[in-house]
Amino acid sequence: MSCTEYLVTLNIPPSLEELMVDSLLLLESEHGFSSFPVRAHHHNNSGLSLAEQVAGRQKRIRFQMYVPVEELPALLAQLREEFSDSGIQYWVLPVIEAGII
């Protein structure tokens, strides 16, 4: 079974939320996306405020969207161009099944 769709997850700094929403609305208007606040936990303390270092977590906004395989390269290229060196962490996972119940 070949994958025809991917789940793209982005963890971004809260300061970039509105820019990301605008970008994704242009890129993903047909498929839509979700966003919600998360706390990132990791051992890399670079870029963390003192409060975040003490708390051991960093505020982030997570975006998730389904992307057809043929649109994935363009999406990633656009995000790299618009958000170069912004500290955005991302994952791309194959979607095995999706639907509405």
Image (tube, helix red, strand yellow):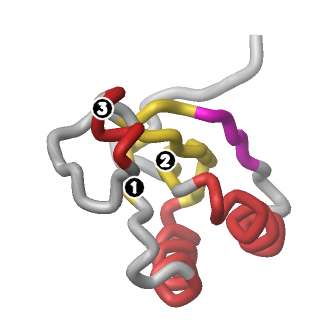
Mark 3 element type: helix
Mark 1 element type: strand
Q: Nearer the viewer, residue 37 or 28?
A: 37
Looking at the image, do the residues carrying marks 3 and 2 touch, with CB atoms under 8 Å apart? Answer: no
Our reading of the magenta stretch's main secondary structure is strand
Q: Which residues are magenta?
A: 33-37
Q: Residue 27 lies in magenta, yes or no?
A: no
Per the model, the C-alpha gap separating discs 1 and 2 is 5 Å
Checking the image for residue 54, the label placed there is 3
Residue ID for mark 1? 90
Q: Nearer the viewer, mark 3 or mark 2?
A: 3
Q: Nearer the viewer, mark 1 or mark 3?
A: 3
Quadrant of the image for the C terminus?
A: top right
| Side (left or right) of 59 relative to 63 | left
Looking at the image, do the residues carrying marks 1 and 3 touch, with CB atoms under 8 Å apart? Answer: no
Q: Nearer the viewer, residue 52 or 35?
A: 52
| First-in-chain label (3 vs 2) | 2
Q: Alpha-carbon neighbours of circle 2 within 10 Å: few (<14), some, or many (≥20)?
A: some
Mark 2 is on which residue type?
Thr
Is residue 62 in view? yes
Classify 34 as above or below 30: above
Mark 3 is on which residue type?
Val
Q: Nearer the viewer, residue 74 or 40?
A: 40
Per the model, the C-alpha gap separating discs 1 and 3 is 25 Å
Residue ID for mark 2? 9
Q: Residue at x 58, y 85 (%)?
A: 82
Looking at the image, do the residues carrying marks 1 and 2 touch, with CB atoms under 8 Å apart? Answer: yes
Checking the image for residue 13, the label placed there is none
Residue occupying the far bottom of the picture = 81
